[in-house]
Amino acid sequence: MSLAVWGGFLGALFGCGLLLVAGRVAVLRRPLLSVRVLPYVRDLPQIGQRPEPGPDEPRSAAAALFGPMLRSAADTLERVLGGTASVRRRLERANLQISVHSFRIEQVVWGLLSFAVAAAFALMIAVRSPGRTVPLLVLCAVAFVLGVLLRENRLTAQVVERERRILAEFPTVAELLALAVAAGEGPVSALDRVVARSHGELSAELSRVLADIRTGTPVSRALDEMANRSGLPVVARFAEGMAVAVERGTPLAEVLHAQAADVREAGRRQLIETGARKEIFMMVPVVFLVLPVTVLFAFWPGVVGLRLVTP
């Protein structure tokens, strides 16, 4: 076949592809009948409406295809590692809305990705050195284990990062609550006002407390659950103080001011300690880089002069 025939064939394929894409775009842009009629029948019961997929239901073809294998691998990993209570506790502290089983699936995926990278590297080496097959297989297995452990380490890092943000937000939120309580509002009304005007991890935790209160949970119980969920002693003390103030009617503004001052002082002390540790690390470039260069610039002209004077 000549080049002209091949060019015409490829051009025809390209034109058919463009027609298919244009037709599909036109269909997608056309409003559905249900969308046009729904505003007029919104109050009627929706019969035959397709429900939203649940958290464990497949949302794509890939999830439906590989989901059973991943779930089976996650069950095996759960039996090998254990520690369900610890993982659930860390998921709550990191505010991740996933189950322990979903987290195990993520661990399997991370392990498979690490295994794939190690397998590609091992395949390149095995082509050149076929005698290293066994060590390369061990390397792939180690890569899978490291991927699984890396996801768990990432969860711990997420917990630490969220707790750091909560500690950074706590003094401001506590001061706002103290001002609202001192202005005459009740603890629940003060929580509502502060949550409506602030954003962050601590505000999300307080909004969860408000949601529990609005669904019928007693205030003291909702605050106690917040204290149990939190991994920070200062937040636990804050929740316990709020619960005691609600139950017994004790003054709350002074307690909140004192807790905010304690957290600020703890943060200042931690900053000083971090600076002291960084000061030691800052000595490394000074001693091993700046000081040798300074000595070289100071003594090199003298050495050159001695060489010129010495016969």
Image (spheres, grey):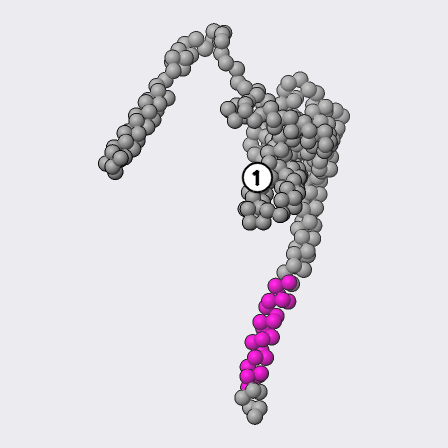
Would you say residue 302 sits in the magenta stretch?
A: yes
Residue hosting label 1: 116
The residues colored magenta run: 284-305
Q: Looking at the picture, does residue 282 appear above or below residue 157? A: below
Amino acid type shown at disc 1: Ala
- Residue beneath the point at 41% across and 9% down: 40
Would you say residue 124 sits in the magenta stretch?
A: no
In this view, the residue in front, 186 or 209, is 209
Q: In the image, 198: left or right of 260? A: left
- Residue beneath the point at 69% across and 42% down: 263
User: x, y percentage for residue 87?
Assistant: 69, 32
User: x, y percentage for residue 126?
Assistant: 58, 46
User: x, y percentage for residue 124?
Assistant: 54, 46
Q: Residue 238 sits in which quadrant?
A: top right
In this view, the residue in front, 40 or 255, is 40
Q: In the image, 16: left or right of 220? A: left
In this view, the residue in front, 222 or 100, is 100
Residue 10 visible from this viewpoint: yes
Q: Image quadrant for the C terminus?
A: bottom right
Q: Give the mark count.
A: 1
Q: Looking at the picture, does residue 9 appear above or below residue 292? A: above
Q: Residue 165 sits in which quadrant?
A: top right
- Residue beneath the point at 68% across and 56% down: 277
User: x, y percentage for residue 244?
Assistant: 75, 28
Crowding around mark 1 (Cα neighbors within 10 Å: few <14, some 14 to 19, many 20+) is some
- Residue beneath the point at 62% across and 37% down: 111
* Secondary structure, magenta segment, majority class: helix
Work out which residue is located at the far bottom of the displayed protein and give it.
311
Residue 227 visible from this viewpoint: no
Work out which residue is located at the far left of the displayed protein and give it.
4
In this view, the residue in front, 2 or 114, is 2
